Image (cartoon, grey):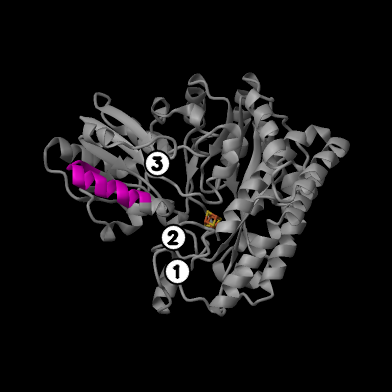
Amino acid sequence: MNILLVNPETPNTFWSFSNAIKFISKKASDIPLGLITVAAMLPPEWEKRLIDMNVSKLYDRDLLWADYVFLGGMNVQRQSFNRVVTRCNQLGVKVVAGGPMATTDYEEMLGVDHFVLNEAENTLPPFLHDLKNGDAKRVYKSSEFPQLSETPIPKWDLLKMSKYAGMGVQYSRGCPFDCEFCSITMFNGRIPRTKSTPRFLAELDSLYDHGWRGAVFVVDDNFIGKKSVLKKELLPALIRWSKDRDYPFHFTTEVSINLADDEELLNLMVQAGFNHAFVGIETPAEEGLAECGKKQNQKRDLVASVKTLQRHGLVVSGGFIVGFDSDTPSIFARQIEFIQKSGIATAMVGLLSAPTHTKLYRRLQAENRLLDVASGNNMDGSLNFVPKMNYQTLVKGYKQILETIYSPKEYYERVKTFLQEYNMQHRARLTLTDVLAFLRSLWKIGLLDRGKWYYWKLLGYTLVKCPEKFAVAVTMSIYGFHFRRVVKMV
Ligand code: SF4
C-alpha cells in the first residue's frame, strides 16, 4: 500500500511568518505534526511519503503513486485542501481526510472517500481494520478522548527538517478553561491529558537523534493545564534533560495568563529551556472577558501579569479580539493603549470569529446571527456573524488598531518597552543562518524599508543599553517586517 500524506498550503497569514522566515532561508514555520503522527500509526510495511505543500510542490505523479492520499488541515487551509481533493478525484485517487477542519465540516465536504475524524488514536484503528477487510465505511468518528499513552513518536524521517524554522512536539491535549469562542475544549475536552514524562522525553530524544537543534514548539492547547504534574515530574526531568545536552532546544508554547501567579512553575519552565509563550489576552475590557467566559483573565492587572512573565525570561506573544457584543467604539483606543503598554510585540489582533460547533457558534445560531463558516485566518478582517456594533465602525476601528500598532513608530517603541522588561535567561548560540539573517535585515529593513530609521534607532539603543539582547532586537525587527506586510493585506 502506498500512502501519500498531504499538508495543504497555508496562505500568507500573521502566523505563517512567511515574510520573516525568508531571512533565515526557511520555507515554513511549522511542521505538519498531526500527519507525521498519523503516519507512525499506519502499518510499518506500508510505503509512506509526505508532501507538505508549504515546502514542496505537489505533482500529479505524486498523487498517482498513491493508493490513498491522507489529507489533513485547518480552516485556513480550506482552499488548498479543496483543490487537492479535486485533483485526486480527477486522477481517480482515493482520499482519506482528517484533522480539525474535516472533523467539524465533513458533512459539507465533497469528493472525500473516507473521513477519519476526531483524534486518530480512536478512529484510525477501526478504519484500518475495515480497510483490510475491504469494507471501509465513509465516516469514522468518536466522542471519547483517548489517553496519550498509545500515541506514537512522530515519523520525523518524513520531514525535510532543514526547510522548517522550528519543530513541533505535543505533551498534552485539552484545556481546563472554557472560553466561549474557542474550539479547543470541543476537540480535546476540559480535562488535560498528558504523555508520561519518560514518553515525552523519548519524543525529544528521537528529535535530538534526528539531528534537530533549535526552536521546538510544544503545541499544547494550554501547556499549564496540569500544574502539579509539571512541577513534580515533567519540568524537573526536562531541566536535567536540557542541561545534560547543553540546551539543544528552546521551547515555545501556549499558556493561560494564570502562569503569572505561579512563580515556581514559571521558574521551572524557564530553567527547562522555555523562552517564549503565547497567551490569549483577548481584551482589556472586563465586560468582554465576562461575556466570553475568560475567567482566568478577569479581575487582574493584565499588563502586570504579562510583565511578570517577561521579567522571568519569557517573550510573550498575545492574542487580542474585538467584536464582542459588549464592545463599544472606545475599545479600539483601549486595545492600542494596552498593547503598547504590555510590550507584546507579536500582538495578533483579530475580529471575533465563531468556529463551527463552538459555544459561541451555537449561541449566535440561536440568535439567528450566523453568516458563514469561520475563515480560520485570524487577521483577514472577515466576520462570520452579524455583530452588535455597526459593521463599518467595527471594521474601521479594527483596521485602525492594526495600522497603529504595526506602524514602524509604535512597533519599535513596543519592542523597546519589551526589551526594558525582558530578563533574558538563555542566550541562543549564533549560527551562520543568524548572521545571514542579520545581514539581510540590514539590507531589507535598514536600507529599503519604510521606517528604517526606527530600526537603526532600536539597534543603537540595544547596543548601548542591553547588547546581550541584540539578537532578540534583530529578530523582533524581522517579525515587524512580516507583520507590516500582513497588515497591508487586511
Ligand atoms: S484558555 Fe485558551 S485554549 Fe483554553 S479554552 Fe480559553 S482560549 Fe481555549
User: How would you rate the neighbour count of disc 1 (Cα within 10 Å): few for under 14, some for 14-19, many for 20 or more?
Assistant: some
Residue 331 in the figure: left or right of residue 465: left
| Residue carrying label 2 | 375
Does the numbered disc 1 mark a residue whose Cβ is under 8 Å from ligand 1? no
Quadrant that contains the N terminus? top left
Residue 388 in the figure: left or right of residue 74: right
Q: Quadrant of ligand 1?
A: bottom right
Q: Secondary structure at mark 1?
A: loop
User: How would you rate the neighbour count of disc 3 (Cα within 10 Å): few for under 14, some for 14-19, many for 20 or more?
Assistant: some
Spatial separation of the CA atoms under disc 2 and disc 1:
8 Å
| Residue carrying label 1 | 384
Dot 2 and dot 1 residues touching (CB under 8 Å):
yes
Residue situated furthest right in the rendering: 464
> Looking at numbered disc 3 in the image, what kind of residue is underneath it?
Gln
Q: Earlier in the sequence, mark 1 or mark 3?
A: 3
Along the line of sight, which residue is nearer the eye, 312 or 451? 451
Mark seen at residue 147: 3
Vertical position of residue 422 compared to residue 26: above or below: below
Residue 304, visible in the rendered structure: no
Residue 458 pos. (x, y %)? 80, 44
Mark seen at residue 183: none
Along the line of sight, which residue is nearer the eye, 443 or 321? 443
Dot 2 and dot 3 residues touching (CB under 8 Å):
no
- For the point 76% across and 44% down, the residue is 455
The rendered magenta stretch, by its main secondary structure, is classed as helix
